[in-house]
Image (tube, rainbow, N blue to C red):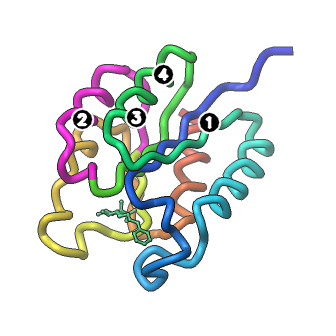
Amino acid sequence: MATPPLIYVLNGPNLNLLGLREPEIYGSDTLDDIAERLEERAGALGVRLEIRQSNHEGHLVDWLHEARLQGAKAVIINAAAFTHTSVALHDAVKAIGLPVIEVHLSNPQAREPFRHHSYIASVARGTIAGLGALGYELALDAAARL
Ligand code: CA2
């Protein structure tokens, strides 16, 4: 039987604190809770997931490259604060040539002005923001259909 398509789910800095701090902004689910629901949904969709989190920009760049080398079909990324700062992530997303879906738990457009610009958005296939943890599941549904 053919191996199910692979999708990378990458999470940036401080997202390891999800559910532990600032639930009024980011919700009460931990990253493990989100990962568990994504794995469940992935099973139903017939795809495999590689779910990672790092507080280091270079790890996220390396994992974007790895996604391409591993033959991933799509990447879902919440680059967290690096969304607003990282030309390196912009370049990596552009370079790998895979459909990349940008996800944010909160709606950065409704927050401080420094969150209004995303270096990822212009090279992403699409962005889902402001829907909390549900955004990851919607992104997975979309990724599986791309
Ligand atoms: O809304 C999102 O998903 C963000 O990507 C989250 C980032 C923020 O810098 C972006 O502007 C929008 C912050 C992630 C930090 O996560 C925390 C979780 C719990 C407690 C503290 C931070």
Spatial separation of the CA atoms under disc 2 and disc 3: 14 Å
Q: Is mark 1 within 8 Å of ligand 1?
A: no
- SS for callout 3: helix
Q: In this view, does 107 lie to the left or right of 7?
A: left
N-terminal of the pair, mark 1 or mark 2, is 1
Q: Which residue is drawn at 47% across and 78% down?
A: 21
Q: Where is residue 89 in the image (x, y as percent from the top left)?
A: 28, 36
Mark 3 neighbour class, 10 Å CA radius: few under 14, some 14 to 19, many 20 or more: some
Q: Are marks 3 and 1 in contact (CB under 8 Å)?
A: no
Indicate the amino acid at tag 3: His
The residues bearing labels 1 and 2 have C-alpha atoms spaced at a distance of: 21 Å
Q: Earlier in the sequence, mark 3 or mark 4?
A: 3
**For the point 47% across and 19% down, which residue is it?**
68
In percent of width and height, residue 102 lies at: 39, 47
Q: Amino acid under label 4?
A: Glu
> How far is the residue under mark 2 from the one under mark 4?
16 Å
Which of the two discs, 2 and 4, labels the residue nearer the N terminus? 4
Q: What segment carries the magenta color?
A: 82-101
**Would residue 120 appear left or right of 100 to someone viewing this image?**
left
Based on the displayed image, in which of its 4 quarters is residue 126 positioned? top left
Q: Answer few, some or many: residues within 10 Å of disc 2's Cα (few below 14, many 20 plus, some between 14 and 19).
A: many
The image's mark for residue 50 is: 1
Mark 4 highlights which residue? 66
* Residue 131 point in image, percent of width and height: 47, 69
Q: The residue under label 1 is which amino acid type?
A: Glu
Q: Which residue is identified by label 2?
A: 90
Q: Say which element carries label 2.
A: helix
Q: Residue furthest left?
A: 113
